[in-house]
Image (tube, coloured by chain):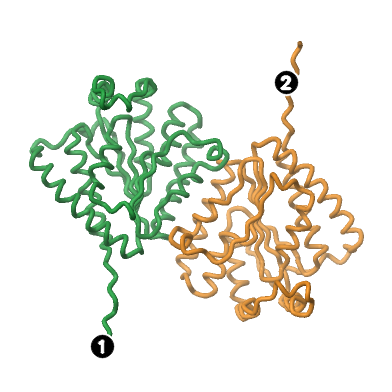
Chain colours: A green, B orange
Amino acid sequence: MSVKLAQISTLPPEDFKKKKIEAKTIDMVIKIGELQHKLYAEGKQSLLVILQGMDASGKDGTIKTVFADCNPSGIDTFAFKKPTEEEFAHDFLWRISRKTPLKGNIMIFNRSQYEDILIQRVHKWIDDEKAEKRMKSINAFEELLQYDNNTRVLKFYMHISPERQQEKLQERIDDPAKNWKHKAADWEENDHWDEYMRCYEYAINNSSIPWHIAPSDKRWYRNYFIAKVVLDTLENINPKLPLLEKSNG
Amino acid sequence: MSVKLAQISTLPPEDFKKKKIEAKTIDMVIKIGELQHKLYAEGKQSLLVILQGMDASGKDGTIKTVFADCNPSGIDTFAFKKPTEEEFAHDFLWRISRKTPLKGNIMIFNRSQYEDILIQRVHKWIDDEKAEKRMKSINAFEELLQYDNNTRVLKFYMHISPERQQEKLQERIDDPAKNWKHKAADWEENDHWDEYMRCYEYAINNSSIPWHIAPSDKRWYRNYFIAKVVLDTLENINPKLPLLEKSNG
């Protein structure tokens, strides 16, 4: 079954009401914090959350909201930017592997290994054959994390419409508190929107670990959607506080 | 075609004479140094040399001899020992990936990712299913280095007979200059010799990048054998000194 992003809504389902959903999200964020504490204390499993999406699709906002109640000792985030000279002198997964979570920890990737088959493919810095090889390497790498380190890999595509993205990029110009996020280059990348969608669909349809497509036009629904998947996953992982064995003494 | 180590000689071919071979090795070691200089100056390709073998099979001696003429700026070696607590809290390739060579460099692994399907399998710390999964991960990892970073991966199994190994371990006790290498545990590992051979054969027969089996009972032939493969590989890689374009001014 092949995903076509244009056929998937970027909006909340019609019967979802903002106030009620926001209250539910708050409850879930608290539960995520509780389970993260157990995950950390247990020290046997870990969680890697990958956030991918076009500019202004809400990666930063998601991190700030969904993981607000986690203890910073057991959670970390890393934003992958243009590779450094040292990173370029290694294979593309070298810098990714270094940042994978320790047992007991949650790691959030703001952008990830997928950039190496997204921006690089869109701009033809790599050809299709290399993109296909890299896709296979990514699958092998993610499977390794799961079977060899009990790392659950959760991948989100933040699905935003081009119209909503334009509004959010414009906010960065109009709102002084958001000016710091403005980069002219973000507007230029939009000339490649269709090609980005094609490359995202390739990644989504060829990943061995499935993606979650988070409708992201509305912040409140996006946060709810992602919090729910994270919470379900942590409940499924089911970390347990280690207890001392009771002595008879 | 399946390799059976017991059917492969650990001795030099009969018509190879020590003095003549040692002279040839010296010539090759010099040429390796010259090509390493070009590899470093070019900065586009790299070489990963993996040395695996039983204790006293000659890993340290090989490094000291074969790479004696290389410029230390462009070459590094790493001896993988028992994983640290931080390393154990990650997948088994995490610590390996960090040490892969930069473009332009040679990296020598004294033991490697293969320990995770050798000592760990021999002692039943992992089961066969996990060993098979790890073998697939190793193949994907080595292929990644080759296609994505122009890293040539050269793997040597240092093939020594159990009798010759006993002699060399005994030298470590008898010769004060070698006492520092003696570890009682090395003798204990020998109770598992046959099982080690079985696990080595599995690795050799299931690797997508082929192994070189270096007859290692005689130091002089082992050094010759490995130097020859390294030199042939560097000649095949054919690194070139970058030249400035001549101006007409």
Query: Pointer 2: what residue?
Result: B245
Q: Quadrant of the C terminus of chain A?
A: bottom left
Given residues B61 and B202, the one toward you in this image is: B61
Q: Name the residue type under label 1.
A: Asn
Q: Chain of mark 1?
A: A
CA separation in Å, label 1 and label 2: 83 Å
| Left or right of residue A82: residue B3 | right
Q: Residue placed farthest to the top in the image?
A: B249
Give how far across and how far down residue B47 sits, in percent. 66, 47
Q: Chain of mark 2?
A: B
Q: Which mark is residue A248?
A: 1
In this picture, is B222 found above or below B166?
above
Q: Name the residue type under label 2.
A: Glu
Contact between marks 1 and 2 (CB within 8 A): the answer is: no
In this picture, is A74 found above or below A90?
below
Given residues B118 and B56, the one toward you in this image is: B56
Give how far across and how far down residue B151 sits, in percent. 62, 45
